[in-house]
Image (cartoon, rainbow, N blue to C red):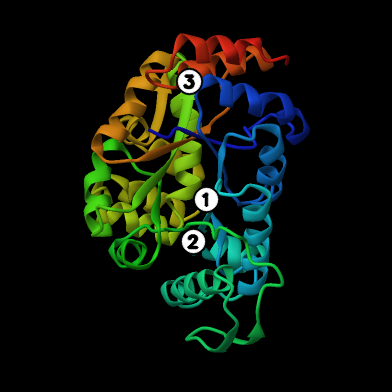
Amino acid sequence: MRWGITIPVTGVPLADHAALVPALAAAGYTDAWTAEVAGTDAFTPLALASTWAPTLRLGTAIVPVFTRGPALIAMSAASLASAAPGRFVLGLGASSPVIVSDWNGLTFDAPWRRSRDVLRMVRAALAGERIDGQFDTFCIRRFALETPPAEPPPIMLAGLRPQMLRLAGAEADGAILNWIGPDDVPRCVDAVQNPDIEVVARIFVCPTAEVEYARALGRRLITSYLTVPAYAEFHRWLGRGEILQPMWDAWAVGDRAAALAAVPDDVVDALIVHGRPEVCSERLQAYVDAGIDTPVLAMLPTPDAADAASLVDILSRLVPAKSTEATAGARDVDL
């Protein structure tokens, strides 16, 4: 099975990942994935990781389909696919109005059609085709990659609700999920309607026995993300509408403290994996048992990681069923 980690790990400078990434590969992680919000871009950390740990599969989760032109997405994907042949996965997604409009000054319009069009155009370009024509959401004139990758990378699509998940199942090579608990997995996988494609899930993990610390951090994340309309609708679809309505009501009137207080413990515990590393490992395995092919851990700051060595030790203990040799290898890497 595959086991992924989100890089850069929060709190660790990107340059320091030159030692961290090989240690994670030695610990049993098979994948390194990036997220693109307001920190690093999606491609630079993977380009570095391709040389730091040449065994890792590299993936973007996700590249927004609005913030770059389709040709630029194809060029960036072709570059990484050529630098890491057979090891790169392009993950695309609609992102959100906050990132697209508020932060990038672009119009967030027709996200399903835009995602479909970018997926189709980029796939054709990576296959070496010349693109010349009108899509529903943009027009491309006489574009072709100068050097298409010898092995075009798989393209995955992030989805939050049935329409986008069905698109992933119909036209992409995989589906990417976010902000779910293990009990949510079957509903999402069923919506993909394609048992033959890979399902990736980004999972927030805070390995610490300090329950209140983890829950306080989880509440801040939940009020930041699940108040975004797309994520709010996603969790209504998942059945959390009634329990999260007090949070949404407080947020709507600007009462941030009340919104935080309105997030129930059981919602935090469902969406944020926390506890001792061994407990977290068992909870992560529950995602796999429910139907996730590739869990991708998004490591949250933890008071238990005092330095680089303790961070690697914690991360290595999160990988289920890893070999003793792999763990030893991780701890032997010079940090």
Identify the residue position indicated by label 1 in the image.
61
Q: Residue at x 43, y 27 (%)?
A: 215
Vertically, is 314 above or below 230? above
Q: Is residue 94 above or below residue 234?
A: below
- In the rendering, which numbered label is found on residue 207? 3
Callouts 1 and 2 close, C-beta under 8 Å = yes
Q: Is residue 304 visible?
A: no
Three-letter amino acid code at the position of disc 1: Ala
How crowded is the residue under tag 3: few (<14 C-alpha within 10 Å), some, or many (20+)?
many
**In the rendering, at what x and y percent does residue 128 appear?**
59, 73
User: Quick one: label 2 or label 3, which is nearer the N terminus?
Assistant: 2
Badge 2: residue crowd in 10 Å (few <14, some 14–19, many ≥20): many
For mark 2, what is the residue?
A: 93
Residue 323 lies, in percent from the top left, at 44, 14
Assign a secondary structure to mark 2.
strand
Q: Work out which residue is located at the far right of the displayed protein and give it.
A: 15
Label 1 CA crowd tier, 10 Å (few <14, some 14–19, many 20+): many
Q: Nearer the viewer, mark 3 or mark 1?
A: 1
First in sequence, mark 3 or 1: give its number.
1
Q: Amino acid at mark 3?
A: Pro
Q: Residue 284, image x and y in percent?
A: 36, 28
